[in-house]
Amino acid sequence: MIDYIRDGAEIYRQSFATIRAEADLSTLPGDLAGVAVRMIHACGMVDLVADLAWSANVVADARAALRAGAPILCDAAMVAAGVTRRRLPADNPVVCTLGDPRVPELAAELGTTRSAAALELWRDRLDGAVVAVGNAPTALFRLLEMVAAGAAKPAAVLGIPVGFIGAAESKEALAGNALGLQYLVVHGRRGGSAMTVAAINAIASEDE
Amino acid sequence: MIDYIRDGAEIYRQSFATIRAEADLSTLPGDLAGVAVRMIHACGMVDLVADLAWSANVVADARAALRAGAPILCDAAMVAAGVTRRRLPADNPVVCTLGDPRVPELAAELGTTRSAAALELWRDRLDGAVVAVGNAPTALFRLLEMVAAGAAKPAAVLGIPVGFIGAAESKEALAGNALGLQYLVVHGRRGGSAMTVAAINAIASEDE
């Protein structure tokens, strides 16, 4: 037998204690600190805090939206798969339209990626939704374009795409938005589905 | 309209070119370099290379196993969700048993986490499989215990759990295994489902 901790609750407790001991959470609003702890837990990097940017009401507004039954609109199947259903306050729908059979044709028509084109299928559910972009910068750019052009506004946007081409720029565009969108971003190249899921799961329930 | 690249293939091309320009891949075997590029793409960090460790035949053996129809055994639903089915060479089964209704009881019986207990349901499929642990250190520890106790050996183990308690230790245990297991790990706290999925998708097909 190898010597390691086998008690899941104890592993969580020690993990979160380690994060709170090592990460500088003092710059974060109280409701965001708990979200940041889970995001750090999902990536193993306490320096993530330095790259966080947010609007004042993002956690409160996203939480209120979820309590009111808002859907969670995800850009990637991995994001949708990671949302812990039992943490959701209102059995909220978790939606990812990327695999919809209409998407390849929409992408060709619109001259964009499938990830961006998939947002066309969000239009009816966008009003007051919680948007979680954890993969594709083009999805985040497209969301900003759609809202600027008059699409309904989501209650909050978690903009945490990852990568080398467009990721940093798309998050700067969200953080600088003049559309009144509540947002949480991880600036720079880092991001991804695991961090995004952690943020949703932390917003969905304050239980650690 | 915001100015950004909308051509998915061009985004991939520029992303991989940026990674190859910035990352030092010279220390990696040829077949692992392509895998590392995709892993870096999934996390946005070119310094990931320094934390990689591997056995000589891990990519070749995993690739051969997949071509022969081996299942991919995943510790987390997010890992299973991220595997790009059309890249798989033999329509390989992608298995995650964590959600099986028997798992909570197994975990209580075995006195371990649900993630570790879920491996009991892998036993019949372990022989020659490709194992992908992208979340739970306890799943990786448990795999080592099972094989040491006589369970069938997988063809290759991608051991890339993330976190603060047990993650680094579980990856050291895999990399130091005396069981003859072929392995790929990311040492330290970093890891997670996105990197793990990227490794599988790169092994499954050499197409960029």
Image: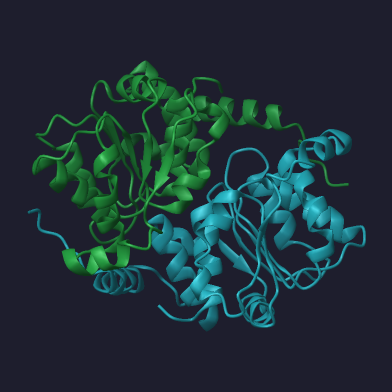
Chain colours: A green, B cyan
Task: Name the residue nearer the viewer: A140 or A155.
Answer: A155
Return the x and y of residue A93 as percentages of the image width and height: 44, 36
Q: State the residue lying farthest toward the right.
A: B150
Residue A195 higher or lower than A91, as above or below: below
Question: Which residue is drawn at the image coordinates 88% and 36% (left, top)?
Answer: B109
Return the x and y of residue B125 as percentages of the image width and height: 79, 65
Q: How many marks?
A: 0
**Left or right, A31 with reference to B56:** left
**Left or right, B151 with reference to A71:** right
Question: Which residue is drawn at the image coordinates 32% and 23% (left, top)?
Answer: A27
Residue A23 appears anywhere in the view: no
Question: Which residue is drawn at the image coordinates 31% and 62% (left, top)?
Answer: A103
Residue A164 appears anywhere in the view: yes
- Which quadrant does the C terminus of chain A fall into? top right
Q: State the residue lying farthest toward the top.
A: A30
Quarter assignment of residue A114: bottom left
Quarter assignment of residue A12: top right
Residue A174 higher or lower than B60, as above or below: above
Task: Name the residue nearer the viewer: B195 or B93.
Answer: B93
Task: Name the residue nearer the viewer: B154 or A15.
Answer: B154
Return the x and y of residue B39 as percentages of the image width and height: 47, 63
**Left or right, B22 with reference to B55:** left
Return the x and y of residue B140 as percentages of the image width and height: 72, 52
Quarter assignment of residue A34: top left
